[in-house]
Amino acid sequence: MKNKTYVVVGGSSGIGLEISGKIAQNGGIVYVYARNSIESEDNTNLHFTPLDVTSGELEIENIPEIIDGLVYCPGTINLKPFRRLTEEDFLNDYKINVTGAVKVIQKFYPALRKSNHASIVLFSSVAAKTGMNFHSSIAAAKGAVEGLVRSLAAEFSPAIRVNAIAPSLTNTPLAATLLSSDAKQKSSAEMHPLKRYGQPGDQADAALFLLSPASSWITGQILAVDGGLSSVRV
């Protein structure tokens, strides 16, 4: 990753911040685009630009000339019974998870094309594969993300690889209410075969793998980083 250029959208907190920091620690140059400023900006390889992916037409400043990797991290956790979900709930989840990713990829695509080995990493969810109570809106949006990944992997091949990570519950600000007590933390850990919930580093390590030459023969895939929840019963 040394001296390569990466873009992390939504890289100012949680998983995105962890990804940004790990890339910078490995010598990569990271352009972070997010609504909020970087919580820790003590690395000269990190460059921050404000960006709200929910705005109409994205006006993005400071686009690098060549981009070797793009990670799109914005997401939602909107857990409600189906009967209480509104059309607006579904549209908002879709707007942030899918349309936001589409607009960002379109903006950065010319710079990605200039790299000889570019990689795009999106985020799905364990809920897109495994039916879970109260997840219908986010599962629908993340299912669309997975379809987008496979379609773009085909269209962009061989110049740009496109993959996604599908996490289970991870300890981030977005999931704070789900892990707000010892009882919730214990229950969340117990539901996973590996008996713990995720940490940002779990997802960041997977993202770095998908961005690196070590995954150069992988595209169009959904990598489950979920403590075994989607495929293992113990």
Image (tube, grey):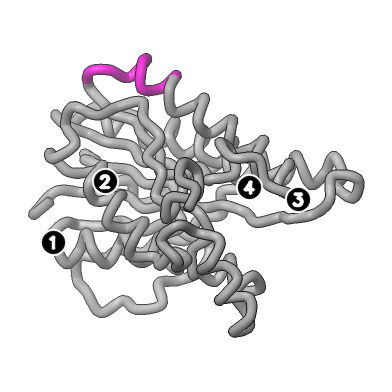
Mark earlier in primary sequence (1, 4)? 1
What residue did someone put label 2 on? 64
- Mark 1 lies on a secondary structure that is loop
Mark earlier in primary sequence (1, 2)? 1
Q: Which numbered tag is attached to residue 134? A: 3
What residue did someone put label 4 on? 55
Mark earlier in primary sequence (3, 4)? 4
What residue did someone put label 1 on? 26
Magenta extent:
151-158
- Kindly indicate whether the residue at mark 2 contacts the one at mark 1 (C-beta within 8 angstroms): no
Residue 58: image location, x then y, percent: 54, 42
- Kindly indicate whether the residue at mark 2 contacts the one at mark 3 (C-beta within 8 angstroms): no
- Mark 2 lies on a secondary structure that is loop
Distance between the Cα atoms at labels 3 and 2? 40 Å
Left or right: 58 with respect to 109?
Answer: right
Give the class, few, some or many, for how many residues have Cα within 10 Å of label 1's Cα (few <14, many ≥20).
some
The kind of residue tagged 4 is: Ser
Distance between the Cα atoms at labels 1 and 2? 19 Å
- Mark 4 lies on a secondary structure that is loop
Q: Based on the displayed image, in which of its 4 quarters is residue 105 positioned?
A: top left
Residue 20: image location, x then y, percent: 30, 61
Q: Front-most of 25 and 110?
A: 25
